Amino acid sequence: MKVLVTDPIAEAGLDRLREAGHEVVTGYELEGDALFDAVADAGALVVRSGTDVSRELFEAAEDLVIVGRAGIGVDNIDIDAATDHGVVVANAPEGNVRAAAEHTVAMAFAAARSIPQAHARLKDGEWAKGDYLGTELNGTTLGIVGLGRVGQEVAKRLGSLGMDLVAYDPYISEERADQLGAELADLDEVLSRATFLTIHTPLTPETENLIGEAELAELEDGYVINCARGGIVDEAALAAAVEDGVLAGAALDTFAEEPLDPDSPLLDVDEVVVTPHLGASTGAAQEHVATSIADQVLAAFAGEPVMNA
Ligand code: NAD
Ligand code: MLT
């Protein structure tokens, strides 16, 4: 069978598919008609977040059995269209959780201690020791929006660094939150108590623009960390809130449009730290999600259950 891979995944996953006798075709720059032509005779399509798997794409893909997402978020895949076309959508929900949690912790420190800004100035030959007075995470409150796999790993790590944990997640049990040392509260209370707010929900109609101008104002003098999905936090409102001193800073790994527009207002605000969707980009995480998705493609081709593992 032909497996079309349109976003880069680890070689170990590609090798597993080849060793099973399948034709692996990579097309990382494919767009528009070229993408539709390439997928027309594919039995499987493997993507990360860079491919828009639209209804039109499913219409062009007559032989498609499975779309494999080498990672967690499936917001770039039209699930209703997949269902209408009888195509399985599988993701790899475990393999990059720790990488994403570690990146979140790194981003919290980067924002709190202005590490990227100070680094850039020192590389430019400037010893700006007097210009930076950071915030200690220890003793402050971390507000977690979305206490799922990544949110829980972040809770464990930042809780162990002395932060108090308060979380908003209407779908998680009080018991699980207790086990993590986190208190469940509604969003308003989380915003009013947190110094650092970290977002870990999927992007859904319910979470889109969940954190806008009014919510940011409640987080008075705090920091926003978003390593989940762009679109959950209103970017223009966030840039304005940091610029105007309503917030102390922000650190973002994910954006409403990716790649981030070079004219984004976020890039004009010094206290906004940005990385180009690197949360899952460790060797271990990439190998894990690539081999996991290869196994699921092989299962689908063999008519076996697809486990989303
Ligand atoms: P998950 O499904 O395990 O957890 C998501 C949590 O959000 C769940 O507990 C759910 O109950 C909660 N939730 C859903 N809707 C909510 C709402 N309206 N308000 C509050 N909570 C809500 O997902 P995960 O594996 O923890 O991933 C979290 C996010 O991180 C996803 O958006 C995923 O795509 C993203 N992610 C990003 C990277 C990266 O590279 N930056 C890497 C991994 C995951
Ligand atoms: C994910 O949802 O798993 C992340 O977007 C990681 C990625 O594939 O880049």
Image: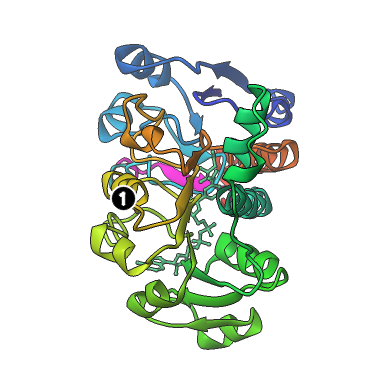
Q: Is mark 1 within 8 Å of ligand 1?
A: no
| The C terminus - image quarter | bottom right
Question: Few, some or many C-alpha atoms within 10 Å of disc 1 (few <14, some 14-19, many ≥20)?
Answer: few
Question: Mark 1 = which residue?
Answer: 244
| The N terminus - image quarter | top right
- Rendered position, 108 above or below 159: above
Residue in the foreground of this view, choosing between 20 and 92 = 92
Asked whether, in this view, residue 17 is left or right of residue 37, the answer is: right
Look at 37% across and 33% down and name the residue there.
Answer: 268
Residue in the foreground of this view, choosing between 98 and 265 = 265
User: Residue 188 at what x, y percent from top left?
Assistant: 33, 76
Residue in the foreground of this view, choosing between 190 and 22 = 190
- Rendered position, 290 above or below 17: below
Q: Quadrant of residue 215?
A: bottom left
The magenta span reads 82-92
Look at 52% across and 49% down and name the residue there.
Answer: 72
